[in-house]
Amino acid sequence: MTKIVACPTLLSSGAWRDVAISYGKARELLDLALFLAGRTGATLAEIEARFECGRRRAQRMIAALGDLLPQLERAVDEERRPRWRLPVSLVTPFLAPSSDELAALAKAPEILERDGAVGEATSLRQLDAKVRAAIPSAVRTRLAVDEEALLESLGLVARPGPRPATNTEIDEIIGHALKARRCLRIHYASHGQVEPRWRRIEPYGLLLGTRRYLVALNAGRKGAYRHFRVDAIVAAELDEAYFTPDPAFDLTAHAKRGFSSYERADEYGEVVWRFSPEAAPHAGQYQFHPDQILEPQDDGTLIVRFVASGHLEMAWHLYMWGDQVEVIQPTTLKTMTEGYRRSDFPALP
């Protein structure tokens, strides 16, 4: 096969957003790239049929894609027709399913079971698990937020219990900024501040827990990742500028630094709890932290170890266990919970 060489690769550098083309044109070229990826590629006639266009437009689309991606290959097939193809590796980053597709995949087994197709429903759930396992962790967390909202709207997920009120308009703006990797302007008051002020940030992801926090960097400045309480954002606006995320940042790994959604650097350290023999079987079925270590003891108690921060949220959670749990480490958390371990709770969490 011969290659059409036009300019340096733009896809890997994020230059799709830098090229002076409209959103619709960019989306069309991305669809064409996905269509041409794989073993056989496509002919001009197949491109015309796929995009319902004429020959000249199909030729212009191929030329534009070749300008963006020099890896575009042209060959002549057995019927002596020109055929264009892209290596699958080039479009792999764009193959992550959308939240709508994941939600549909989650809903389909229920419909099949309702119609008596139990075997097919089982196979589809296995496919769902495989698809989710293949999604990069940095994308998985973001999709989970969108999918949860979509499933809730379909009546498939309910979230009882108290939680901070949400602002749909602000949530949509944040979601758009996260997906498009656009800078965001938020009207926000930090803890201790009386009046909110406008801040320009680069949003990296959401942490879901007792409260929701937006993980972000101050735009154009290096420093530590900051956490902004979503319910404390008074207003939000999309900035015109895009940003390139730090490739070393992993939202899943970052989330592990906190017990729940709050993370505090000066509290980060080893946490050790001991559950009573009565509570040990129940606590053993809990995931207090993704990296927890469970150590059953000879006396029937259970030691739980993990490394995280967020002592206040830990104290809130430990209160529900009454006197069935004891804090071994850290000392500050032990001091916070001593004297508040009740013995009259009728059930464990």
Image (spheres, grey):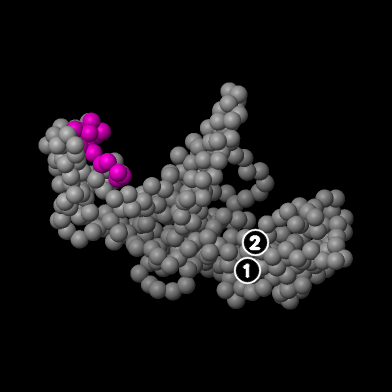
Disc 1 crowd, CA 10 A, few/some/many (<14, 14-19, 20+): many
Give above or below for 66 relative to 312: above
Three-letter code, disc 2: His
Eyeballing the image, is 142 above or below 83? Answer: below
Residue picked out by circle 1: 308
Residue 115 point in image, percent of width and height:
58, 23
Residue contact between numbered discs 2 and 1, judged by CB atoms under 8 Å: yes
Q: Secondary structure at mark 1?
A: strand
Q: Position of residue 302 (x, y in %)?
A: 79, 63
Residue range (magenta): 37-51
**What amino acid is at disc 1?**
Ala
| 47 part of magenta stretch | yes
Q: Which residue is mark 2?
A: 289
Crowdedness near tag 2: few (<14), some (14–19) or many (≥20) residues, C-alpha within 10 Å: some
* SS of the residue under disc 2: loop
> Does residue 81 appear to the left or right of 287 in the view shown?
left
Residue 210 in view: yes
The structure residue drawn at horizontal position 87% and vertical position 65%, both measured from the top left corner, is: 299
Which residue: 67% across, 73% down?
Answer: 270
